Image (cartoon, grey):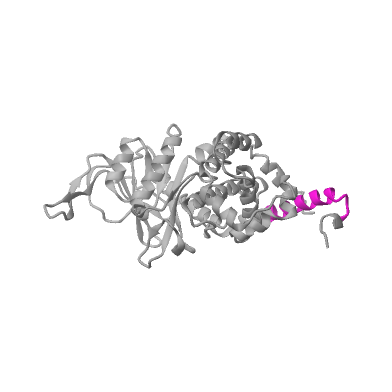
């Protein structure tokens, strides 16, 4: 049996964070179980969660085989006579209410967030926002963002607090091919949920619109954005002190100014053609240019945060890399690079289950001081051991009562 004596928390203890009362309440008070004889919401929840942990690559055939196995039924208390087919799973994914899984995910995020210490909350009030795309098998997608190649893709825009995923939006509409559209929507959805948290949103160069920054500023949304170099601006005030250069290690602040930005205002002429007229945005922003002397490269940043030091802003932006590591973790360890369902409804269901699995794995990883791969491998081992123990008890110590020949 894979008993890891050095662990502070076991898989069984982590799974107890999933509130059975919530699953029952949502099943009773939502439409998740309407017109379903076998694949009720609770069963789908545990089937998808189990398969995410126990398989390197998911498919609807894998879900079918897992549900019909004695081990899965023993672990989750299902009747031996319960059977499903791949077609039933496919149809259920396309029609089951994704809000059932979204509510479980949001409830669990709130519970896990309460476990952060005060120091961690202050440290992780940075929300890293970025998008990742999935294009595997997307030529068959019913709804997706068209590419020049003729294939389609799905875009997931995440908010990540440094420990756990705090929000996600699924985009399949063509207008969301641009981050200028996708990221602001993801951020504003997050602001609605956490409007009193005083978060700072850290964003890469995908978002450059001065009009969006003006909108953020008007809604008191704090941001730090990596700007494209040499963009046009008007300086109102410089914060640099010539007698006291702002520098640390290999870095030196070249510009730290209060500025107004220029933007292009869309104008439609009489022929219906769209062109852009340059105009100045009236809001004040802070422009910082920091140079790395070792590699002789400048980094431009725009923010509406005037109280932080230049070093703090640079350090905060560097933490944005956490979300890239998180993306790699989701795709390599939790199958997010592969679509189990080609229907948007099913994609949302699988996404929320993946985030729930990610939260459980991250708590397990953090509590036991493990790496991503080790945590995933040990969770799978604990799952199999739990099944083995249940089957042995069920068989009264006689494997022939379980494994018929």
Residue 119: tell me if it is visible.
yes
Residue 239: tell me if it is visible.
no
The quarter holding residue 9 reads top right
| The stretch drawn in magenta includes residue 379 | yes
**Quadrant, the N terminus:** bottom right
Q: Is residue 150 above or below residue 173?
A: below
* Left or right, residue 148 beside residue 85: left
Picture coordinates of residue 29, whole percent (x, y): 56, 33
Instruction: Residue at 38%, 44% (x, y): give it.
Output: 185
Instruction: Residue at 36%, 56% (x, y): give it.
Output: 177
Camera-side residue of 171 and 185: 171
Camera-side residue of 54 and 35: 35
* Left or right, residue 251 beside residue 98: left
Picture coordinates of residue 263, whole percent (x, y): 23, 49
Picture coordinates of residue 17, whole percent (x, y): 65, 39
Give, as a single range, the part of the protein colored magenta: 377-398
**Quadrant, the C terminus:** bottom right
Camera-side residue of 324 and 149: 149
């Amino acid at each position: 049996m894979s008993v890891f004596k050095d662990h502070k928390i076991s898989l069984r203890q982590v799974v107890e964070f999933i509130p059975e009362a919530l699953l029952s309440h949502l099943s009773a008070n939502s439409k998740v179980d309407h017109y379903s004889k076998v694949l009720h919401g609770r069963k789908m929840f545990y089937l998808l969660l189990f398969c995410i942990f126990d398989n390197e690559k998911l498919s609807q055939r894998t879900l079918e085989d897992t549900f019909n196995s004695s081990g899965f039924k023993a672990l989750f208390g299902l009747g031996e006579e319960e059977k499903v087919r791949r077609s039933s799973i496919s149809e259920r994914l396309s029609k089951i209410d994704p809000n059932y899984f979204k509510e479980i995910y949001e409830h669990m995020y709130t519970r896990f967030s309460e476990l952060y210490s005060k120091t961690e909350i202050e440290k992780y009030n940075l929300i890293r926002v970025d998008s990742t795309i999935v294009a595997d098998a997307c030529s068959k997608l019913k709804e997706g963002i068209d590419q020049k190649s003729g294939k389609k893709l799905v875009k997931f825009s995440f908010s990540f607090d440094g420990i756990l995923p705090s929000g996600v939006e699924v985009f399949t509409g063509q207008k969301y091919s641009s981050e200028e559209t996708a990221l602001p929507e993801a951020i504003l959805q997050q602001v609605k949920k956490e409007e009193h948290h005083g978060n700072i949103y850290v964003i890469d160069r995908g978002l450059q619109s001065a009009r969006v920054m003006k909108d953020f500023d008007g809604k008191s949304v704090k941001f730090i954005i990596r700007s494209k170099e040499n963009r046009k601006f008007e300086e109102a005030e410089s914060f640099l002190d010539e007698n006291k250069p702002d520098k640390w290690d290999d870095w030196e602040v070249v510009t730290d100014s209060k500025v107004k930005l220029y933007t292009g205002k869309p104008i439609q002429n009489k022929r219906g053609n769209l062109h852009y007229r340059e105009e100045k945005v009236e809001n004040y922003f802070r422009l910082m240019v920091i140079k790395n002397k070792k590699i002789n490269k400048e980094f431009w940043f725009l923010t509406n945060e005037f109280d932080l030091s230049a070093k703090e802003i640079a350090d905060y932006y560097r933490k944005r890399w956490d979300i890239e590591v998180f993306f790699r973790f989701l795709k390599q360890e939790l199958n997010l690079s592969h679509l189990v369902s080609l229907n948007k409804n099913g994609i949302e269901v699988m996404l929320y289950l993946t985030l729930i699995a990610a939260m459980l794995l991250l708590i397990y990883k953090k509590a036991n001081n493990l790496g991503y791969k080790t945590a995933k491998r040990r969770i799978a081992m604990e799952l199999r051991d739990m099944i083995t123990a249940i089957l042995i008890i069920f068989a009264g110590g006689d494997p022939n009562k379980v494994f018929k020949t």
